[in-house]
Image (cartoon, rainbow, N blue to C red):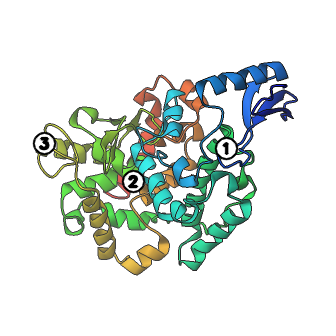
Amino acid sequence: MRYRDPFTVFARPLPSGKTIYYYRTYDEGGKRTTARSTGRTTRTAAKAYCRELMRQGRLVPSRDLTFAEYAANWWVYDRCHYIRSRLARGGSFSRTHADIQRLNLNKHILPVFGKVRLQQISSREIEAWLFSFKDKGLSNVTANRCLATLRIMLNEAHRLEYIDNNPIKAVKPLKEESGVKAVLSPPEVKKLFDMASSRNLWPNPVCYAANLLSACTGMRLGEIQALQVEEVHSDYVHVHRSLDRKYGLKDTKTHDVRDIPIPSIVSLCLEQLKSINPEGFVFSTNQGKSPVYHKTVTGALYKALEKIGIGEEERQKRNITFHSWRHFFNSTMRSRVPDSKLKLLTGHRSQEMTERYTHFNVKDYQDVKMIQEQIFLVECG
């Protein structure tokens, strides 16, 4: 009797024009399994590959994966194949971002798709799920973020050949309303940082200096919290770390290292803080042992805004937050210094700019210091 292989091999052309051989077989219940690539370009080599899988007992998968089975290790930082792959290839992925993705998965994705066979998830089902966020009273921003989480997972499932076709490829994100951060006006900034009245507006020098430093440099709050005494100089600050609220000190958001010039008013404030906290963290309320709590700084800003006439309702309507200082700095500098220099100062820069400005000298940024002095010494002094 003629021997018959328990698998069938067939050719599948790729968009590149290359032909790869795939195979199909049957599971214990007689159901035809998903086609899987052999990675071989000839029928003979493909059959030899399948026979080797038979010898190893790996030819027939026990059953097709459910989405929950596929998602078991997803976004678990030390076990997620996707994260490990990113890191191994020189990319980056923070633990906080992994936590957010895992939350999206557990809260919004698994309850809907967990029991569905990975191969059977359709574009129609994904789109219906996306539209359901509005029915639950959730924003399009939340829906799109969860869609992005699912998109990464299904893209990987397709790339690694768990599924033949990628159903999410045809699903587009929802329209989002742009939440533009407001920029405080120069008179409002003058009121907030006027040294003569600062004691009546701010609870302590730490909160005053943190907000002033961000307004002068565009630094993120986490970067300010992470500053230590040895990183603060008379005319610039050295920024190379940020503070993660859960995991502590880490690289900056864009993994950049930068020196940022500071005007004399900020230098005086930082020297005052260094006299209070001679070691450890500059922005600290316990002698430099730990960074100031982020809500202490933001809460002080909101109370100061109330005292100059910007109440909570107006603040929320104008979308003013601590991050607004970053927008203020960008808006102030944009028309006065080249974009390439501004990107370096804020940490928003391309790889090309990184290479171009590898050697940084604060003396090259006298134009920035002059603008800082004009705005924060003349107008706010």
Q: Are marks 1 and 3 in contact (CB under 8 Å)?
A: no
How many circles with numbers are drawn on the protein?
A: 3
Q: Residue at x 53, y 40 (%)?
A: 343
The kind of residue on which mark 1 rests is Asp
Q: Secondary structure under badge 3?
A: helix
Q: Residue at x 76, y 56 (%)?
A: 170
**Where residue 270 appears, x then y in whole percent?**
23, 44
Q: CA distance from mark 2 to mark 3?
A: 22 Å
**Where residue 160 appears, x then y in whole percent?**
65, 37
The kind of residue on which mark 2 rests is Ala
**Mark 1 surroundings: few (<14), some (14-19) or many (≥20) residues within 10 A:** some
Q: Nearer the viewer, residue 301 or 162?
A: 162
Residue under label 3, please give it. 275
**Where residue 84 appears, x then y in whole percent?**
48, 34
Can residue 42 be seen here? The reply is no
Q: What mark, if any, has residue 27 been given in the picture?
A: 1
**Where residue 103 appears, x then y in whole percent?**
44, 57
Q: Judge whether 362 appears above or below 173 on screen.
A: above
Q: Residue at x 53, y 34 (%)?
A: 86
Can residue 60 be seen here? The reply is yes
Q: Judge whether 143 appears above or below 284 on screen.
A: below
Residue under label 2, please give it. 215
**Mark 2 surroundings: few (<14), some (14-19) or many (≥20) residues within 10 A:** many
The kind of residue on which mark 3 rests is Ser
User: Residue 276's image quarter?
Assistant: top left
User: Residue 146's image quarter?
Assistant: bottom right
